[in-house]
Image (cartoon, rainbow, N blue to C red):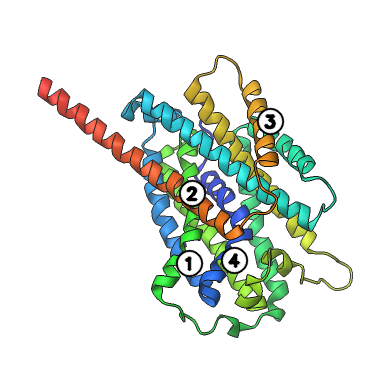
Amino acid sequence: MTQTVTKLQCAALVMTTILPTAVLILPKTVMNSVAQDAWISLLVSTLGGVVAAFALGRFAAGTKGGVPFQKGLGESTGRVLAALAGLALAAYYFSIASTALHEFITFISAEMLEYTPKIVLKGAAVLVLMYIAAKGIEPIARISVLLMLTSFPLLALSVLLTISKMTWRQIEPVGEHSWTTIALGGVTPLGWFSEVAIVLLVAPYMIRPKEAVKGAVWGVLLTGTELIVMVLQSLFVFGPNLVRSMEYSMVDLVGLIEVGNFVERVEVFFITFWMSTVFLKLGIFLFGTIHLLETTLKLPFDRSPLLLGVGLLLWADTSYNWPHDMNQDLTTGITTAMLLVCNLLFPLALAVLGRLMRANKQAEGGADA
């Protein structure tokens, strides 16, 4: 395994993993719970995400340079348990990819390509994702840095162009909700921040795996900053009640932008940029699935047949296993629970188990001596 990912690229990969889908779902979801205090809930969940990033980064930094996560795990927990963990994580990444792809195509169908069958859109998207995953983590990391550096000027520009439409009283009264309610409103954002767990797969590819902690923490901080600014921007322009009635508040927000009489439909530029980030995020998840299956099953052939098989399965799963009408609140709740369990509790259990087994081996070695 060639180690080519830098600390900056690690932070960009974390940001790419969290932000693209969170930006569509979180404003409405959090405001449903805490209205104008949504930005405080996001601030609290960002701090929780930093703690999670530090813990997961420490776990990831313990890997040996160039040794895939699943193989390194086998040295501490045993091959059988490591294999089961690898398969479980591969299934999780595949499931999340299917969920995110469904949400992405639902958005594209509703906003841009209403009359194109979703099954065709999903097939085209899967082909792009297979191409991205086949290129490997290094090209994905390089493009992630480019998108990260582009996102901040775009966000600043959108704020500047909508500042005349902002009403600062929309967030008053500040702190109206209890801290318990604000904390509960931060649970869903914390679920999305927990996707920083991708650092477990990225760390072995890093030039200095010990820098995984800093990369993970900075990735969460940058993502949290952008989300808080976006939520405040939505609050100042629309107010909490209107945002709660919107399906995609950020799209409606950039749709208000006007640049004289010579630039129309500015939101198209923002949507195009956002689409590129979504494709990259889904490509990361598909890569994670393929990577874990490769290192766990030790297949005697190259990546191409596995990539083709998983790609076809992803297309079939997201095309036929999703109901046409879903309860959005129920779906969000289930997704949040799955994110927290798979990204936080599962790695924590593996880390604790690995420490216990190493301590037990050392004790047995001392007893034999």
Question: Is residue 5 placed above or below 336 in the rendered structure?
Answer: above
Query: Which residue is drawn at the image coordinates 71% and 80% (left, top)?
Result: 164
What's the mark number on residue 339? 2
Q: Callout 3, which amino acid?
A: Leu
Helix, strand or loop under label 3 = helix
Query: Which residue is drawn at the image coordinates 42% and 67% (left, top)?
Result: 183
- Which tag, 1 or 2, sits closer to the chain's start? 1
Circles 1 and 3: CB atoms closer than 8 Å: no
Identify residue for label 4. Answer: 27
- Residue 301 visible somewhere in the drawing: yes
Residue 54 place in picture, x, y as percent: 39, 50
Identify residue for label 3. Answer: 312
Identify residue for label 1. Answer: 185
Residue 297 appears left or right of 149: left
Question: Is residue 54 placed above or below 185 in the rendered structure?
Answer: above
Q: How many marks?
A: 4
